[in-house]
Image: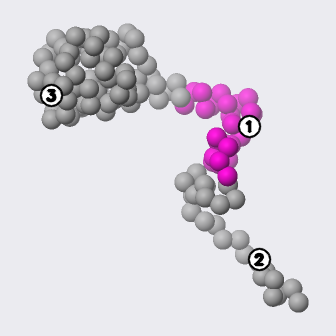
Amino acid sequence: MPRLLGVDIPNEKPTQIALRYLYGVGKKTALELCHKAGINPQVRARELREDELARLAALLDKDYVVEGQLRRQIGQNIVRLKDIGCYRGIRHRRGLPVRGQRTRTNARTRKGPKKTVAGKKGVKDLR
């Protein structure tokens, strides 16, 4: 398996798809990388030569923010939002949806499993 920036990319997939296994590389960026490095995007990853892998690694280091550096940058942005106490930072801190989604129903991914509240009475109990 070829290795780029500490990530094993799959042998059997075309280069343009195999590059997407890197965090921060999508369809457009993968095609752009292949074009800049002078590599046919349809060639299987196992058929890449060492010099082609080196060119790809150099391009990724020089022109793109990917993998650990990108993860670190995103983490720092979230910490900054929490520190300044803005609305989005508070939502991150409380583990609630950040981008305006409803929370009365749904939002279970962010909120976690249901926590049943005791003592809730129905309409019949009030009479």
Q: Name the residue under label 3.
A: 44
Front residue (pair 47, 1): 47
Front residue (pair 83, 97): 97
Kind of residue at disc 2: Lys
Residue found 29% across the figure and 10% down from its top:
36
Res 114 → quadrant: bottom right
Q: In which quarter of the image is the C terminus?
A: bottom right
Earlier along the polypeptide chain: callout 3 or callout 2? Answer: 3
Kind of residue at disc 1: Tyr
**Left or right: where 40 falls relative to 96:** left
Q: Name the residue under label 2.
A: 120
> Could you classify mark 3 by the number of other residues whose Cα lies within 10 Å: few (under 14), some (14-19), or many (20 or more)?
some
Earlier along the polypeptide chain: callout 1 or callout 2? Answer: 1
Q: Where is residue 1 in the image (x, y as percent from the top left)?
A: 16, 31
Q: Is residue 15 above or below residue 33?
A: below
Residue 77 colored magenta? yes
Q: Position of residue 116 (x, y in %)?
A: 66, 71
Q: Mark 1 points at which residue?
A: 87
Residue found 19% across the figure and 34% down from its top:
13
Q: Where is residue 41 in the image (x, y as percent from the top left)?
A: 22, 22
**Left or right: where 17 falls relative to 52:** right
> Could you classify mark 1 by the number of other residues whose Cα lies within 10 Å: few (under 14), some (14-19), or many (20 or more)?
few
> Could you classify mark 2 by the number of other residues whose Cα lies within 10 Å: few (under 14), some (14-19), or many (20 or more)?
few
**Would you say the magenta stretch is mainly helix, strand or loop?**
helix
Magenta residues (range): 75-102
Residue 5 visible in this rendered orientation of the protein: no
User: Which one is in front in this view, the residue at disc 3 or the one at disc 1?
Assistant: 3
Q: Distance between the residues labelled 3 and 2?
A: 61 Å
Contact flag, marks 1 and 2 (Cβ < 8 Å): no
Q: Distance between the residues labelled 1 and 2?
A: 30 Å
